[in-house]
Amino acid sequence: MSATAMPESTSWQGSFWLPQNASPLTGGQDALFYFIYYLSVFFFIVVVGFMVYFAWKYRKKKEGEKTPDIHGNTKLEIIWSVIPGILFIVIFIWGFRDWVSLNQPPQDAMEVRVTGRKWDWSFLDVKTGAETSDLFVPVNKAVLLTMSSADVIHGFYVPDFRINRDVLPTMYTKLWFKAEKEGNYPILCTQYCGTKHSQMVRYVRVVSEEEYQKQMIAAQGAGLTPAQLGKKIFEGKGACASCHSVTKERTRLVGPPLYGAYGTDHKILIPPSNKEETIKFDDNYIRKSILEPNYRGVPGYALIMPSYQGQLNDKELSALAEYIKSLKE
Amino acid sequence: MLTSHHDAGSNYLNAKKGFMSWLFTVDHKRIGIMYFVSIGVFFLVAGLFALLLRAELMQVRIPDATATSYMISADHYNEAFTFHGAIMVFLVIIPSIPATLGNFLLPLMIGAKDVAFPKLNLISYHLYIVGALFLVYTVAFGGLDTGWTFYTPYSTQTSTSVIAAVFGAFILGFASILTGVNFIVTVHKMRAPGMTWVRMPLFVWAIYATSVIQVLATPVVGVTLILVAIERLLGIGIFDSTLGGDPILFQNFFWFYSHPAVYIMILPAFGLVSEMITAHSRKSIFGYKAVAISSIGIAVIGFFVWGHHMFTSGQSALASVFFSLLTYGVAVPTAIKVFSWVATLYKGSISFTTPMCYTFVFLFLFLIGGLTGIFLGALSTDVHLHNTYFVVAHFHYVMMGGTIIAWIGAVFHWWPKMTGKKYSETWGIISSVVVFIGFNLTFFPQFVMGTRGMPRRYYDYLPEYYNFHLLSSIGSFVLAIGLFIVLFTWLHSIFYGEKETRSNPWRAKSIDWTDTAVVPIEHNFEKQPISSHGPYEFDELVKPAKAGEH
Ligand code: HEM
Ligand SMILES: [Cu+2]
């Protein structure tokens, strides 16, 4: 997590009035915006039009001109109260319907916890446990944000998604969106919070599913040595520790103990004939054992280890190797 | 015309002499003038702060901005917008029309020789000055960086001088309440014989409705601000959630006052516009009752819409729904007023005087301000616009484009009555044109950057907003030039202006014009005026065949 947020130079993508709408389903506000907009333009032209026309037509031509004593016109007054009244009700109901969808995240939304603090954001991906300072999400996936603040009130605003909600201390507020286009969308703070209020700029980075996975993994490893990262995966995401012991005692669990194994000569059985072979316990052996555990057996253990193919990337594999390597005196 | 032959030698301006005769006067007219001068000074100061803000925002904003790319530091910028907002709201717009023209005109319009409690009126003014000095004190020492909204928990945590500012706002609240009580009693008890409620000028209706809001709403903000001070001083958790308080509670309290306060700001302007548009088009107001009653309607419903400032705050989604619905309940009477003013012009005899030009400017700008309110009142569109420059533009269109413009126009309108001098019609009209251009150039681009997502209270911004900021800043300088032309027109009139000789140059029909001297005498009227007709029955009116409606 870098200390200062860095605004990026972006070219304008959007219409004259509104930014691009990358999450059109969230609230669907744009249609209502334009409805009110065209109504406003219409009423503006009518009212200013009459004003200018009357001002010109009835300008004073001579002193002491006679003017009619008009006190009102009930019919006209009813018309111009009822018509705006009806339009306002339409607008209210329309806004209300969008409001409902804004407040109802889909059931299958992936969850991210958002923390606002003076003066930065941080994001915790609930599933992977990865913590990032920009919000990485896969494209076309509904995302539910559960937000809170570490200090004063902030406002979480993504103009390109039309979402905006205050982030409060000691209370959770929620927002959701579903970005339909890859890209980087600025997150701005809308609730004044002091010195660097205007510089709490972070980005929602909408990426492909693979890129998202990559980023989560990279984030999981951020700031750790490869061995530390390996340990984290070994105990966390990989859940390796549930079957392999790593202590000096070389306790026997479901799988063979790994303490002190690195660099030794290791006996294995190659199916289907279970011919015994001796192999060097090195990085390649570790990698192969994680990705294709059943290409060999270890004497005395059942062939039940799951394959991690597609779940761990190169960086993680190397990290695991480093960790296993470090398990010695 | 009763008193038009009155000896021009003695009037309220020269009846007593010396600084002290002003400072301790109980004459509502002099108090009005003193308010005018004081508020004018604060307007100038807060306006200069605004120019500072605009100058800051004019610099190129780039991703690689360095510390020296900024004219002033972030903290100074934050203090500057706080002073601008707080001074404009608490010291300028809220008291502007009621304290100046309300004081000056209310007794004159209803044919009274003063307000009900003249001494209380003077106390209000002194409280105003004391409260104002407290606020100004924060400018000089410690600064204040909370924004005029004082949102907790920021305001209970910042190291700047919140206490002094809060105390100042509290005292100002008292000034406002006392003025309100005074005006309410005056309207009820001091009307001239024959002055029924439906013969009152619409400005009196507007001031009356405003006073009711002032009396009912102001205590709430007073209490709230004191609670903030208690929390800061004693560390008792009221709003600060880390101390066990509720952070949204403050916002509820605050807007419970501050939303009605926006009607304190605009209703008096509505009243002035009704006076000016009738006098300069020589027509009776179209739909007197609708205009008068809509003021009261706005005042009442205005109390139940505060939550529309909080749609995105985390308040209950259901509460937001009611607030949105009620917001449109206020919008209808507002629309009725605008239509009625335009209809008043129909078949009139319209003179393009300075007050009339300002009235046209008002209608144009207020219309935009009102229409943009519709975007903000709808639940879903507000989400995208809340706390952006769209809101900034919206409230400047209503508060400056509405209130301040009507105020300036009305000062021109009553200028002869207040000063006994003529002003330059040419320069008056030029000022209205320059103000109109400058205003739109300043604030229209803010709508566009707002809808594009530029948040408010930013001293730094993404590069895509630069062009709009640049236009806005240029506009602010044009606007400032326009306002200086106004000031010079007034000063020129005072020092070099021709003497006004007519007691009723606009040939208006309300008592403030018909029954007073060129410049009113100290006790307003030589003898008790009697109201025998409505305020907009002009001599040249062609009465309808079957008269007797009023
Ligand atoms: C049809 C008329 C109007 C409607 C529907 C309307 C609606 C709104 C709404 C919903 C907001 C909150 C927006 C947000 O914070 O996201 C707002 C803000 C505001 N309005 Fe209006 N408004 C109207 C007229 C006025 C008038 C007449 C005034 C004052 C003279 C006014 C002054 C303000 C101010 C000062 C704010 C901003 C407060 C702040 O957040 O600092 N409005 N308006
Ligand atoms: Cu913030």
Image (tube, coloured by chain):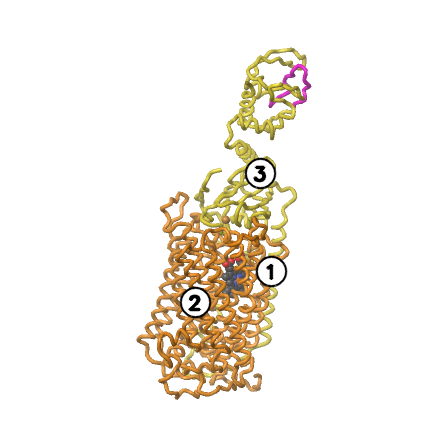
Chain colours: A yellow, B orange
Q: Quadrant of the N terminus of chain B?
A: bottom left
Image coords of residue B233 (percent x, y): 51, 54
Residue A41 is at least partly visible in this image:
no
Label 3 CB less than 8 angstroms from ligand 2 = no
| Dominant secondary structure, magenta | loop
Residue under numbered circle 2: B129
SS at mark 3 in the image: strand
Mark 3 neighbour density, 10 Å: few (under 14) some (14–19) many (20 or more): many
Residue B296 is at least partly visible in this image:
yes
Magenta residues? A290-305
Q: Left or right of A193: which side holds B306?
A: right
Of pointers 2 and 1, the one earlier in the residue sequence: 2
Q: Left or right of A107: which side holds B444?
A: left
Label 1 CB less than 8 angstroms from ligand 1 = no
Label disc, if present, on residue A125 of the rendered structure: 3
Image coords of residue B533 (percent x, y): 52, 85
Q: Which residue is drawn at the image coordinates 57% and 86% (left, top)? A: B548
Image coords of residue A295 (percent x, y): 63, 18
Where, by quadrant of the figure, is residue A240 drawn?
Answer: top right
Question: Vertically, is A243 above or below B131?
Answer: above
Which one is closest to the eye, mark 2 or mark 1? 2
Whether marks 2 and 1 lie on the same chain: yes
- Chain letter for mark 2: B
Whole-angstrom CA distance, mark 3 to mark 2, is 55 Å
